[in-house]
Amino acid sequence: MLALVKTQKGVGHLQLREVEAPKIAPDEVLIEIKAAAICGTDIHIKHDEFPYWPPVVLGHEFSGEIVEVGPEVEHYREGDRVVGEPHTKACGKCYFCRTGNIQICPSKRSPGWGIDGAFTKYLKMPEKLLHRIPDHVSFEQAALVEPTANVVHDVLERGRVEAEDFVVVLGPGPIGLLAAMCAKAEGARKVMIVGTPGDEALRLKVAREVGIDYVVNLTEEDPIQKTLDLTNGLGADLVVEASGAEPAIRTTVDLVRKKGRITVIGMTGKADIAFPWDKAIFKACDLIFNLSTSYTSWDRAISLIAERKINVDAIITHREPLTNWEQVFEDVEQLRALKAVLIP
């Protein structure tokens, strides 16, 4: 079967090549991939900026149909439409696994970087990581369950969006747009999203189309002053940092109110950055770092998509065959795409 493979360490080294179809263990299922979305992680792997074990098939945001089940699989059958949590190889024995945090198990090796992923025809997954998707949710929509589950975990579960919160999202990429939509769906009073001139043509345009209350191009408006004006000088209840840009990260402390919350999603790709530590102390704000997804975030994400409480279709800009991966990757990197879905 044809697969997009990171063949070796270093920048680049992505290649379409023929690989063998996986053989399932007794507790696993074989999934025919129907749609697989490109994540920022895939771009980081291309540029040698994220851990990975080559040669490895990329891709971890996927949906598909089960075509084979192992003899120990109890709750799924052939024909089921599914998505899967990328927590494969979590040991189940360490402190983090035993406390329900398999997503940060030191032994975890996820599809797309630690083991072979979804940019191909077939993927094997253990039964315990699967979730069914409703029949009225398309495979392309379902491919966005994984990034939505990240946002649910980071913004709703850990960032704790509360009714009538004023929420500011920094970075109008796919994750930032999903964060803004999830905050509105959860009952935020108003949501503001902030981008740069490079975001104006596509990302900020989509933010307006999906109904984000305030869409700010930071070269045209000062997001800090606007936040203060809209909150009677108080500041945002919750700031979502989804850009990974060092200047934006520093402004989170100016945007948040005293005793407010900053939830962190964006990665910088740097070992160290400057941050106004003492200013954050004097605001007594909560700074919440996040990684990956929880079990509960998956069913909540599926529900948000299925009930049309968030509009994932609005951020899918590319639907292309796997063979067009090179052009699609370029469009993602050049901000000509939001979420790009590959069809193996």
Image (cartoon, helix red, strand yellow):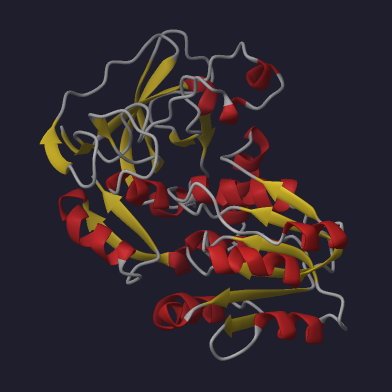
Q: Residue drawn 46% across and 24% down?
A: 88
Query: Residue 234 lies in what quarter of the image?
Result: bottom right
Task: Quarter of the image for the N terminus: give it.
Answer: top left
Picture layout, residue 228 above or below residue 153 = below
* One can see residue 253 in this view: yes
Residue 35 is left or right of residue 164, and the answer is left
Q: Quadrant of residue 236?
A: bottom right
User: What residue is drawn where x is 58% and y is 41%?
Assistant: 291
Residue at position x 63%, y 33% from top? 295
**Screen quadrant of the C terminus:** top left
Image location of residue 147, percent across then percent down: 51, 50
User: Residue 166, how many percent across, how many down?
Assistant: 78, 71
Q: Residue furthest left?
A: 18
Q: In terms of image quadrants, where is residue 275? A: bottom right
Q: Is residue 309 visible?
A: no
Vertical placement of residue 90 versus 185, above or below:
above
Q: Eyeballing the image, is 267 above or below 184?
A: above
Q: How many marks?
A: 0
Residue positioned 61% across, 63% down in the render? 249
Q: Nearer the viewer, residue 241 or 161?
A: 241
Looking at the picture, how far across and down is residue 227, in whole percent? 75, 80
Give the percent coordinates (x, y) of residue 131. Answer: 53, 34
Residues 283 and 313: in front is: 283
Q: Nearer the viewer, residue 189 or 289?
A: 289
